[in-house]
Amino acid sequence: MTKNIMIVGVGGQGTLLASRVLGNTVINEGYDVKVSEVHGMSQRGGSVVTYVKYGEKVYSPIIDKGEADVILAFELLEAYRALPFLKKGGKMIVNAQQIDPMPVITGAAQYPADIAQKLADVCDVTTVDALALAKQAGNQKAVNIVLIGVMAKSSEIPYEKWVETLKTTVPAKFLEVNLKAFDLGYQL
């Protein structure tokens, strides 16, 4: 059985590191893995989407609408945009952070209200203040690893395997903070 995970956020939030941690963990568990990264204006805070598919045999990394088992969203509006990709019975893990896109910053648009509630009304969603937990771990940029920790808790992969992957994937100078961030998310 193939598992489809979509990671969405904005440029600079660490979606690519999160997809590497996820991909490496499932590879180490013996799964076939395909990863595809879709960059928007990532360097300017634009949308970044990563698809991670794994299973016995995976032929394509692309996840179509209604196919994602899990959507890991690093920002509220990106979660809302990704909602059509969540399959019936799928799970969404969302960082409660709001990052205004350029149309909102320039005053051309308004940030949608009550996104967390709108998501809760239509799907199985866990909303997390991952930014606060990342700061507690020692670096606000560790939001990505906090969310990986939340997702890992409900996965079939043991805690120790995730930690092993973090040790081999995260640069040494950031390892301690990321291990703390992972634990805070995992224990949530």
Image (cartoon, helix red, strand yellow):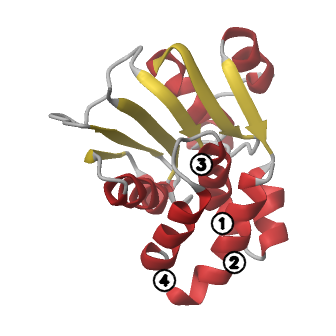
Dividing the picture into quarters, in which one does residue 95 lie? top right
Residue 41 lies, with reference to residue 61, above or below; the image says below
Q: Is residue 61 left or right of residue 67?
A: left
Give the mark nearest the N terminus, 1 or 4.
1
SS category of the residue bearing label 3: helix
Give the labeled residue for mark 4: 171
Give the labeled residue for mark 3: 152
Local packing at callout 4 (Cα closer than 10 Å; few below 14, some 14-19, many 20+) is few
Q: Is residue 132 left or right of residue 58?
A: right
Residue drawn 66% across and 46% down? Answer: 153
The disc at residue 177 is 2
Give the labeled residue for mark 1: 142
Q: Amino acid at mark 1?
A: Ala
Q: Amino acid at mark 4?
A: Pro
Give the mark nearest the N terminus, 2 or 1.
1
Answer whether labels 2 and 1 touch (C-beta < 8 Å): yes
Give the mark nearest the N terminus, 3 or 2.
3
Q: Quadrant of the N terminus?
A: top left
Task: Pinpoint residue 138: horizontal percent, then vertical percent.
Answer: 78, 77
Local packing at callout 2 (Cα closer than 10 Å; few below 14, some 14-19, many 20+) is many
Q: CA distance from mark 4 to mark 2?
A: 11 Å
